[in-house]
Image (cartoon, helix red, strand yellow):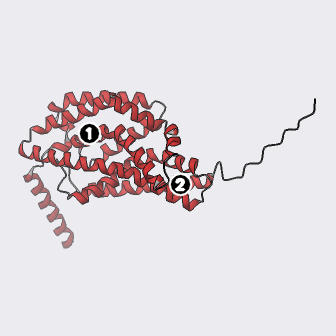
């Protein structure tokens, strides 16, 4: 029997299968962008109170602030998918090309959340009008928001969309067959729709907790991140759902659970303004 000599495998060119440096740069930029969005969100929240509705924001300004919030809250959990997509499909691309492709993916992703922001603005505007006409309605609006969020955590839409977000590789292979035109933008938007389906229930609790409640946003961002990336994410989903159901039962009787649905006291606001003016006068004198 003739001796068959097996050829040695060709050496892998460094930087193609595992471009460590490029990956580190991509992750660093993602983290910095999310951190900047958090800084902007916290700074804006300090200039705004906490009251029902849109807090007087015009629609374009609300939508801009909403997109900044989504960058802060959602970018840490979507970054692994965006980077995996670009490196898996375009591993031969140069660094600048990858940066453009990631930007397109994230833009498409944010486009999906911008569409949800339109619905959020309408819901907040309607809530503000209801609470303004009947302050007692805030308790039941808050209870309904918590109840809907809790039921969504156990629903089939959450289960299907969360499965996609936790294990996106099969879907990414399907995305690779998309037509080339604006491919990364469309892939990002498609993945964003799955993310909206997974997380819209978490977002609506900002109605009772406060649209600009930074602590609530940080807590929800942590839940979203762990649901998608932590091994025990499905268990966390159910635990959060149970917590929301408990809050729904308590909301009609506990006003402190509804900071985003409490009407501000005009007399207290005037006192705060008077105190601020006195402080400013004292500062000019001394």
Instruction: Classify mark 2: residues with Cα within 10 Å, few (<14), some (14-19) or many (20+).
Output: some
Quadrant of residue 43 within the rendered picture: bottom left
19 and 256: which one is in front? 19
Give residue 162's mark.
Answer: none
Q: Residue furthest front?
A: 179
Task: Confirm or deny contact between disc 2 and disc 1 (CB under 8 A).
Answer: no
Q: Residue at x 37, y 52 (%)?
A: 110
Q: Residue at x 50, y 59 (%)?
A: 100
The residue positioned 30% from the left and 29% from the top of the image is 243
* Residue 29, x across and y down, in percent: 49, 56
Q: Tell me the distance, in whole angstroms, between the alpha carbons under discs 2 and 1.
A: 32 Å
| Mark before the other along the chain sequence, 2 or 1 | 2
Which x, y percent locates residue 215? 31, 45
Task: Pick out the residue farthest to the bottom.
Answer: 285
Report the residue at 30% width, 32% height from top. Answer: 152
Residue 34 visible in the shown view: no
- 221 left or right of 184 in image: left
Pointer 1 local density, CA inside 10 Å: few below 14, some 14–19, many at least 20: many
Q: What residue is shown with label 1? A: 205
Q: Quadrant of the N terminus?
A: top right
Q: Above or below — where is 51 with respect to 248?
A: below
Observer-nearest residue: 1 or 137?
1
The local secondary structure at tag 1 comes to loop
Residue that mark 2 sits on: 26
Q: Position of residue 127 (x, y in %)?
A: 15, 44
Q: Quadrant of the C terminus?
A: bottom left
Q: Is residue 35 left or right of residue 42?
A: right
Measuring from the top left, give residue 131's x and y in whole percent: 11, 44
Relative to 276, residue 143 above or below: above
In the picture, measured across the screen, residue 81 lies left or right of residue 137, that is: right
**Taking 184 as reference, is 150 left or right?**
left
The reply to whether residue 101 is in sight is yes
């Amino acid at each position: 029997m003739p001796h068959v000599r097996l050829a040695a495998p060709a050496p892998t060119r460094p930087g193609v299968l595992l471009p460590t440096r490029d990956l580190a740069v991509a992750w660093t930029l993602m983290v910095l962008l999310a951190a900047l969005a958090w800084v902007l969100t916290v700074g804006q929240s300090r200039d705004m109170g906490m009251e029902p509705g849109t807090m007087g924001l015009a629609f374009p300004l609300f939508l801009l602030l909403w997109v900044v919030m989504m960058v802060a809250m959602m970018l840490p959990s979507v970054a692994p998918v965006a980077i995996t997509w670009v490196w898996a499909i375009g591993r031969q691309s140069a660094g600048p090309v990858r940066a453009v492709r990631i930007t397109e993916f994230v833009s498409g992703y944010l486009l999906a959340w911008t569409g949800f922001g339109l619905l959020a603005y309408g819901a907040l505007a309607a809530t503000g009008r209801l609470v303004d006409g009947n302050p007692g309605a805030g308790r039941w609006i808050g209870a309904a928001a918590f109840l809907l969020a809790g039921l969504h955590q156990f629903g089939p839409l959450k289960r299907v969309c969360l499965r996609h977000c936790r294990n996106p590789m099969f879907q990414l292979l399907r995305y690779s067959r998309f037509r080339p035109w604006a491919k990364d933008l469309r892939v990002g938007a498609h993945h964003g729709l799955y993310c909206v389906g997974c997380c819209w229930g978490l977002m609506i609790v900002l109605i009772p907790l406060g649209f600009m409640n930074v602590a609530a946003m940080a807590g929800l961002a942590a839940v979203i991140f762990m649901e998608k990336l932590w091994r025990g994410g499905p268990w966390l989903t159910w635990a959060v759902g149970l917590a929301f159901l408990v809050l729904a039962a308590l909301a009609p009787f506990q006003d402190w659970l509804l900071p985003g649905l409490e009407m501000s006291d005009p007399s207290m606001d005037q006192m705060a303004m008077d105190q601020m003016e006195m402080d400013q006068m004292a500062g000019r004198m001394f």
